[in-house]
Image (cartoon, grey):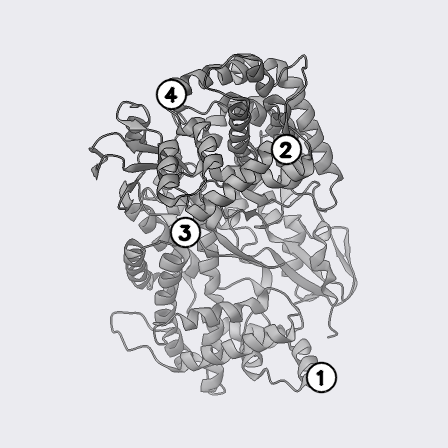
Amino acid sequence: MALADFQALANPEKFLADPTVATNLLRNSDDFAIAAMGDYLDILETRTGEDFGALRRMLENSLMFQEQQPHLVMRRLFAPFFSNKAIDQWQGCADDAVAAALDTLAQASDPDLIRDFVRPALMSFMTSFIGCAQDTTGQLYDSIRSANSVVSHPLLSLSELRKINASCIHILDSIEKDDPADDQQPQSFKSYLRENSGPGSCIETQHAQAAFVLVSGITMAQSLGLTLYGLLRRPKETWKQVALPGWIDDNLSELFLTYPSALTMVRVPTRDTEIAGCPFHKGVPAVVDVTRCNSALRDTRAPNARLGGLSFGAGAHKCPGEALSRMFFKSALPALAQRFPDLCLHVDRAQFQVSPMVQALLAMPCERDGKSTSVSARMVDIKSLEAARSVINCDADFMPPAMETHLKALSERAGLDLDPAITIARNAMFFMSGERHAVLRRVVAGHLGNNRLDRWQPRIDAAIDAGLAQLAQAQSPDLIRDFADPVFHGSTQDMLGIVTQDSARFNKLAPVLQDVLEPWLHLRELRRLQGVFTELLETMDLPESAPQASLLQVMADQDMPDFTLRDKKALVLVLYGASFNLAHTLGNMAHWLLTQPKDEHSNIADPDWIDRNFEQLLSTCASPKYIYRMAREAATVDGVPLAKNDTLRLQLLSINRGTAVGNLAFGHGLHRCVGAALSRRVLKSALPRLFQRFPDISLLPQQQRYFSMSQTVAMSALPCRLSRASAI
């Protein structure tokens, strides 16, 4: 057949999102063919003289790319080996592979769920299942991942195909090496093929068929990684339930429905035809949107919505490995949840690989448990809520980091001018104690307290209106650039009194102020920070008098002993730097809500729903990573001994997860965030209005990007679509 034009993959608005139409299309192998990969290789080899022999051999023995009679023959050959009864025999082998991977994860110094659990579990199991030598170096896994990318796009570049062909050579060589015989394991796939392929089959064909199955097996790793990412971003109670007997049996089909690795499936009409009134034209690819079809099935709550939807395809080319995937998931998920009940993700460090057709996780750093531990000679990570609350509520024993004293001593020892940094520390409320802190807290609370914010509601509403308008007008809408950031700037600058001589320059430099949140910065970072801080201070003007006086104007008009005008400006700058967390948390909340199953969060446009669920949202999505305290005297916290002046780093990732009531997202006690009331008000106002204005808003799959920030979970980009894609 002629090569098709695959520009359709670049137009999601035309993807098929009706599950009935999509299923009928996939089942119609008479009128719809798979992509002509072989024809494409023919053209490239003729034009370039390249030899893609290994890749061609794999494709010719792949159920995914075969058609008609050859496909039927191979499918019948594979069917007995992949039946439910046959696959059940491999449960013990899967359990052993998972147990070994759990030990690998437990011993990892910087644990990553993909590298230290999903990958070793899959490779240990699949090499035994196929009957080839174990992957001791990791090179086979890399080759499999490379070869599997042939399904990521129908027409890959020449350089990509060269890499894939080299990977196929390595895989085929590995298949030829037998796994040492183990009488305790079922018959391997290679052995099965030798006995059942028939007299017309050669060993090279059998090895290519086994290689195809080995490469296809990586989709189990892709799906398992996505499922873990989804489950571990849900409330903590969900992860606890995964460990319970019977949970996986009751929920596995829904997991396949909710977290598919396949994004799209492409079929090419062999003639003009139509399905349910939807026309299809010869040679013009039809693209099935798997995630939206699955979502539609899930929303109906119909019985067939529990069968995995289109995650495994449909029709003649439906994946034969569904039983294998179910068995592997049943082994891996409960075992992981039982071994690590307090598992948490570093969501901002997760790495995705996304193509028009497939999504997968490459890295998923995590915290294995909630045990407090020493991270250096003078710093301890506190991970339990009980221990964290005991620390944060006891100012007599634990104080904020004494940064002013530290910087003065550092300046004297190094002979450096650190006056700008000292000015920062002296006026950063999270580094203060005593009367100076109490004075500022009264002043700021008098301006930003909840009972004082009603007068600022029109300004907040105007900022949200501006953000919604910017989002609506954006050619490539982004929820961070076009909504969260303008809402933040518009809600806070006037209220705090940020008036500058060059607003563009100020807004460009201001994000550096977020680094103030981290104590004990290296000298080079201190110099950079104080340079920016000095420039920002010099560009700040005193706001003019207005009916709604800003915080800076209020403080400027007050007689505050020991506070110069420079101190007051510095305080406002530090508060503004800390308030960037408002934008980050708004972005995190929007991302979380738009990636949860829609039927579980169908009321997100309702302000009352947001209000009722706000603490759960906050504990899951708040952007700060840590709260810091110093031990005034030697002590023991959560079983970890501390010397005087040791730093306690309260790790909010572990402490807050699932803590709907009593979370520490805004701190607690004397040092509770003075901007908490403002943040709550803005977030509760902005979120429902976003979803009211754009009820069909959706995210581009796994296109979120994060800043590399040590103290904050902060997205730099969150691309989205504002309208619903075409249903058919």
Q: Looking at the image, can residue 80 be seen?
A: no
CA–CA distance in space, label 3 to label 4: 33 Å
In-front residue for pair 76/279 = 279
User: Which circle, 2 or 4, is nearer the viewer?
Assistant: 2
- Residue at mark 1: 47
CA–CA distance in space, label 2 to label 1: 62 Å
Residue name at image x 38 percent, y 17 percent: 435
Instruction: Name the kind of residue labelled 4 in the image.
Output: Leu
Residue name at image x 37 percent, y 78 percent: 191
Q: Viewed as shown, does residue 504 lie left or right of 216?
A: right
CA–CA distance in space, label 4 to label 1: 73 Å
Instruction: Name the kind of residue labelled 3 in the image.
Output: Pro
User: Picture coordinates of residue 593 (x, y %)?
Assistant: 55, 36
- Considering the numbered disc 3 on the image, is that residue within a helix, a strand or a loop? loop
| Quadrant in which the N terminus is drawn | bottom right
- Considering the numbered disc 4 on the image, is that residue within a helix, a strand or a loop? helix
CA–CA distance in space, label 3 to label 1: 44 Å
Circle on res. 365:
3
Residue name at image x 60 percent, y 59 percent: 355
User: Which circle, 3 or 1, is nearer the viewer?
Assistant: 3
CA–CA distance in space, label 2 to label 4: 32 Å
- Residue at mark 4: 670
Instruction: Name the kind of residue labelled 1 in the image.
Output: Arg
The numbered mark, 2 or 1, whose residue comes first in the sequence reads 1
Residue name at image x 51 percent, y 13 percent: 446
User: Picture coordinates of residue 165 (x, y %)?
Assistant: 55, 78
- Residue at mark 2: 539
Instruction: Name the kind of residue labelled 2 in the image.
Output: Thr
